[in-house]
Image (spheres, rainbow, N blue to C red):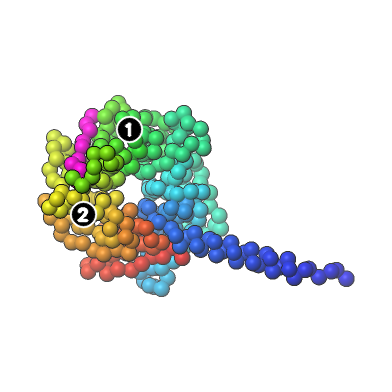
Amino acid sequence: AAAAAAPGILFDADQSYHQEEQHHRTLLSSSTLLAQARAPDPRFLAACSSTGHVFIWDLFVALEERTRNKPIRTFRAHPDCIYSMVSHQHLLITAGATDIRLWHWKDLLSDQSEVKAFRTIVPGLFAGAAVNVCTETNAVVVDNGRLFAATGDSNSYVVNLSTGALETVLKGHTNYVHCLALMPDGNTCVTGGEDGTVKVWDCRSAQCTRTLRPTFPKSIPPSSKKWIGCVAVDRDGDWVVAGGGAPLTLWNTRSFSQVNVFGRDGNGDVLGRPQHVMFTDEGLLSGGNEPFLNNWQLSGQLFSRVSTSATSVFSIDVHAGGSDLPKIMTVAGNVPSIDVFLSPGYSCQTLDVL
């Protein structure tokens, strides 16, 4: 008769499995959610994390059955932090510490047990660096078949999305480029960096046409770092707003004159360091290193403040609503969950990663 398997082997394997599962849950529970993206079908929302994971929720199910607020898919997209992500047509694009990866939404929303990126772009190679050099991509935007990537090597790269070939390098910042936005013409780009400047670029000539310098609060010593962490352009291309170590500052794009400064107290200090900003039909939405979502009028008046689960907000997404979904605003930050705000009344629900 065959010898029975040693009980200890089964026990060790079982124990190893549970230890691995516990480690996985502990890792996910420490996630900071840095960016969000909508699938072509806006009922599906994705978020990327500091642990390299991507989470995808079915918002229709989560809103209809409030107990089902867990992701429909969780996968490790990068071995390290994912700083930014964007959805473009049939693609989800994730950007991490060393590379940018392209995924097909149809694969991510299928019942496949494993999914793989079909293309990888390494910005560090464009700068002549070795593959293992840390050149994180802090922001990605897609327009007209081109991928715009703001990176940690002080450059922004314009890449052909179909081939992965480099088209243009935007050089001019002296430190990390944290954020990037496009004008509606697709040929003008706005970037913000660790050097405290906002730069406007002609993408056809790769030339910086303007450098904007917001007013930094008096409380920041001259020797301290002054950074720009977020930038946005309105849909008509009339306004640019940016902030970070500086308060949110608004410029008119006709003359690039400074029009308004948001969120300063009587001493000129910033009320929370802005980390994300976006234009809405009513004005601006912003979030930063405080547990609030700020709703601004372009006049500079703070229209409302809404409490958030995150004490540091990194990402805001707004869906205008449609036949299946109401108007939805989702907010992500330094907690392993996303706040869902419904209009009207800002009724709140939470999407959890676990």
**Mark 1: which amino acid?**
Thr
Q: Nearer the viewer, residue 89 or 208?
A: 208
Q: Residues within 10 Å of mark 1 (few under 14, many from 20)?
A: some
Classify residue 47 as left or right of residue 204. Answer: right
Identity of the amino acid at label 2? Leu
Foreground pick, 278 / 98: 98
Number of the label disc, if any, that sits on residue 327:
none
In the rendered image, residue 308, in percent from the top left (x then y), is placed at: 29, 63
Task: Calculate the distance from the C-alpha at mark 2 to the C-alpha at mark 1.
Answer: 27 Å
Q: Mark 1 = which residue? A: 174
Taking the spot 32% from the left edge, 57% from the top edge, the residue there is: 312
Tell me if residue 318 comes above or below residue 186 in the rendering: below
102 within the magenta span: no
Q: Which residue is mark 2?
A: 271
What segment is highlighted magenta in the picture? 209-217
Residue drawn at x 13%, y 37% as measured from the top left: 257
User: Do residues under tags 2 and 1 come within 8 Å of each other at their CB atoms?
Assistant: no
For the question of whether residue 186 can be seen, the reply is: no
Q: Say left or right for 276 vs 124.
A: left
Q: Quadrant of residue 293?
A: bottom left
Looking at this view, name the residue that lies furthest to the right: 1
